[in-house]
Image (cartoon, helix red, strand yellow):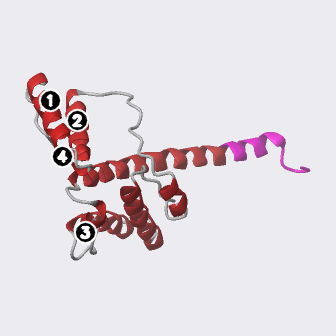
């Protein structure tokens, strides 16, 4: 460069790099928050997923809840209408295939179905409330798989072993 020094160019690049890192961090936090909604819907699913997902936002309360979230983000100007529709579709793909929410699942739909191996996730911190939520989710999963006897035995063990254990729905 003839007029602009390398140090000024470096400062410009570092400023843009900082923005890119901040956006990446914010998106990870957003996706984690959306994953919490996905966990709640997964736990609430008390029938085969195809049946649970039937209908649209006018006829299915679960679909209405999720549509409301993304429509609200659009109304607030946080995301575009196209992004809201894409994220909503990605949400239901993640639910149906048992993968974690990713905003670009629409583009990866075929790959998501091939690699639909559910992952439990890494535990970085926990509490007794978190344990109760996890066990409640495991109970719901066992029931969804038709393992009712196993779920009943597991529930008995939880009640006997953990003071005050109650099956819960994941809190928001």
**Nearer mark to the viewer, of 4 and 1:** 1
4 or 1: tag closer to the N-terminus: 1
Mark identifier at residue 64 = 3
**Residue 10 sits inside the magenta stretch:** yes
**Nearer mark to the viewer, of 3 and 1:** 1
Relative image position of residue 25 (x, y in whole percent): 50, 44
3 or 4: tag closer to the N-terminus: 3
* Number of marks: 4
Mark identifier at residue 158 = 1
Mark 1 surroundings within 10 Å by alpha-carbon count, few (fewer than 14), some (14 through 19), many (20 or more): some
Mark 3 surroundings within 10 Å by alpha-carbon count, few (fewer than 14), some (14 through 19), many (20 or more): some
Q: Which residue is mark 2?
A: 135
Task: State the separation of the CA atoms marked 2 and 1.
Answer: 8 Å
Depicted 33 relative to depicted 89: above or below = above
User: Is 128 positioned to the left or the right of 105 in the image?
Assistant: left
**Nearer mark to the viewer, of 2 and 3:** 2
**Residue situated in front as seen by the camera: 147 or 29:** 147
| Farthest-out residue, right | 2
**Residue under the image location 54 percent in, 57 percent down:** 111
- Boundaries of the magenta span: 1-14
Relative image position of residue 154 (x, y in whole percent): 17, 33
Q: Which residue is mark 4?
A: 169
Main secondary structure found in the magenta portion: helix
Relative image position of residue 153 (x, y in whole percent): 14, 33
Asked whether the residues under the numbered discs 4 and 2 touch, taking CB atoms below 8 Å apart as contact, a structural biologist would say no
**Residue under the image location 38 percent in, 38 percent down:** 120
Task: State the separation of the CA atoms marked 3 and 1.
Answer: 33 Å
Task: State the separation of the CA atoms marked 4 and 1.
Answer: 16 Å
> Dot 4: what SS?
loop
Task: State the separation of the CA atoms marked 3 and 4.
Answer: 18 Å
Task: State the separation of the CA atoms marked 2 and 3.
Answer: 27 Å
Mark 2 surroundings within 10 Å by alpha-carbon count, few (fewer than 14), some (14 through 19), many (20 or more): some
């Amino acid at each position: 460069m003839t007029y602009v020094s390398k140090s000024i160019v470096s400062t410009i690049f570092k400023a843009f790099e900082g923005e890119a890192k901040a956006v990446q961090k914010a998106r990870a936090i957003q996706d984690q928050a959306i994953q919490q909604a996905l966990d709640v819907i997964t736990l609430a699913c008390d029938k085969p997923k195809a049946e649970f997902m039937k209908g649209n936002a006018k006829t299915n309360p679960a679909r209405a809840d999720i549509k409301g979230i993304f429509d609200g983000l659009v109304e607030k100007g946080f995301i575009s209408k196209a992004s809201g529709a894409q994220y909503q579709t990605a949400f239901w793909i993640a639910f149906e295939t048992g993968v974690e929410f990713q905003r670009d699942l629409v583009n990866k739909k075929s790959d998501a179905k091939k690699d639909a191996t559910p992952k439990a996730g890494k535990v970085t911190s926990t509490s007794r409330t978190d344990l109760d939520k996890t066990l409640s989710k495991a109970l719901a999963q066992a029931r969804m798989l038709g393992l009712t006897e196993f779920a009943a035995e597991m529930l008995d063990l939880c009640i006997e072993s953990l003071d005050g254990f109650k099956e819960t729905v994941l809190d928001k």
